[in-house]
Amino acid sequence: MAKAIQAIRGMNDILPDHIGFWQHLENTVRTILTAYGYQEIRMPIMEKTELFARSIGEVTDIVEKEMYTFADRNGDSLTLRPEGTAGCVRAGIENGLMYNQIQRLWYTGPMFRHERPQKGRYRQFHQIGAEVFGLNGPDIDAEMIVMTARFWRALQLPEVELQLNTLGSNEARAQYRDQLVAYLSDHMDQLDEDSRRRLNSNPLRILDSKNPDMQTLIAGAPQLLDHLDSESADHFELLKQRLTQAGVAFQVNPRLVRGLDYYNRTVFEWVTTQLGAQGTVCAGGRYDGLVEQIGGRATPAVGFAMGIERLVELLVQAQVGLPDSAPHVYFIMAGAEAEQQGFLLAERLRDELPQLRVLNHCGGGSIKNQFKKADKSAAQLALVLGESECQQQQVQVKYLREERPQQTVAQTELVTVLKTVLAL
Ligand code: HAM
């Protein structure tokens, strides 16, 4: 036998035993997004490399070391999308969705980052993201965060906590950055290698360092919250008020800076302690400068994306009940005549009862064997069609999950009987 080929490290198959959780999550989130007025948009999974370099930031981990970038046959540099915001903004500008308009958009699909794979961190992973364009007030930030809180309630995932911060305006942040660099430069001996590298390129990210040896230094650093411009401070106050009024608890985390460069003002993350090191299940914030930065007219924007794998893992852990997807009926057919009649009868049932889940037995075999398969399928009923049922235009209804005598039903009555028995 030839050696079997395996999937690429960090890129997983999603198998049928988990797909119910994915669909439950996707359906729940889609229903709520639609109820808040969001419309779906679908972008290509590849973009020109320059788009990500310009939007996510040249000196971020993603752009520096995690992108799947390659030259295509024309020699153009392309990148598999590491996230959806850049492509969504590009699509909005290119298709004239932005200028003087308000858009609430959402998307879902695979994203690609060449990170070190571990539980909850993959090289191909999936996000559901949402972006709002054209609104600059804290009301939409609040609405968006309250909507995410609604997702977790609807999914019965209470163990997630909201962390909130504001990065202020670009100008205020630039001033703060100078102070931070001055403070850190005075303590150069305490900086680890990574932080020294970031000192001039991306000093705010140093605040996010997980290195225990650096925590005292970070705790003593000047805080961005003390250097906010007054508009950003007001924006943040109003956002906090709205969340409190809506009963959404949050924790202000002054060290929350995010790993992508495009944010200003509001940033937030939903985190859980149930997933080990990769505990952020949803993250986002405001990015008022990005549309202009990649060639559109200045348009305020705010958005978030959730990691589907991490949320599915929470659903699995919480043993959240899924909608039943087992067949209602398993169709047993004995003999050539029954196979032919049964095939057509099953199609008629599907015409008249679109919500009925029918699994036909295919491939012949003994009745005993077919009953075994019926049992294994978890169907509630077996419909049995043999030679004599064919002649009499009847079918036997056998109850597989309850003690109840078998019934002989005329084929013309079958829809009515199934409707009653299965409460369809
Ligand atoms: P992000 O924080 O890079 O933000 O990713 C959002 C979420 O995607 C994370 O919180 C996590 O749940 C999931 N995620 C990220 N990387 C991985 C991975 N390697 N494996 C599994 N899950 C992962 C963004 O992507 C922004 N575009 C969010 C945004 C939208 N901001 C504004 N609009």
Image (cartoon, grey):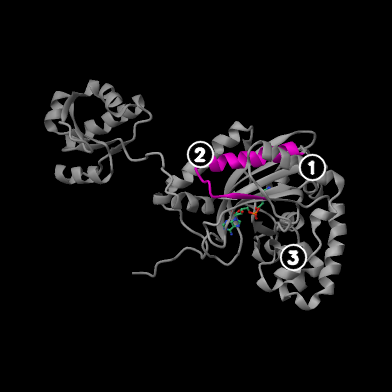
Image quarter for residue 149? top right
In 3D space, how far apart are the residues under numbered discs 1 and 2 (Cα atoms)? 33 Å
Query: Sequence order check: which comes first, mark 1 or mark 3?
Result: 3
Residue at 28% across, 39% down: 379
Is 115 on the left-hand or right-hand side of 268?
A: left
Q: What residue does disc 2 label?
A: 27
Instruction: Bin the neighbour count of mark 3 within 10 Å (Cα to Cα): few under 14, some 14-19, many 20 and up.
Output: few
Q: Which residues are magenta?
A: 138-163
Is 100 on the left-hand or right-hand side of 274?
A: right
Residue at 71% across, 35% down: 103
Is 318 on the left-hand or right-hand side of 164?
A: left
Q: What residue does disc 3 label?
A: 219
Q: Position of residue 22 (x, y in %)?
A: 48, 46
Q: Nearer the viewer, mark 1 or mark 3?
A: 3
Q: Main secondary structure of the magenta part?
A: helix
Q: What residue does disc 1 label?
A: 235
Closer to us: 202 or 408? 202
Element carrying mark 2? helix
Element carrying mark 1? helix
| In this view, 389 is above or below 210 | above
Q: Nearer the viewer, mark 3 or mark 2?
A: 3
Q: Position of residue 256 (x, y in %)?
A: 71, 56
Query: Sequence order check: which comes first, mark 1 or mark 2?
Result: 2
Closer to us: 121 or 356? 121
Disc 1 marks a residue whose amino acid type is His
Instruction: Bin the neighbour count of mark 2 within 10 Å (Cα to Cα): few under 14, some 14-19, many 20 and up.
Output: few
Tell which quarter ligand 1 is in: bottom right
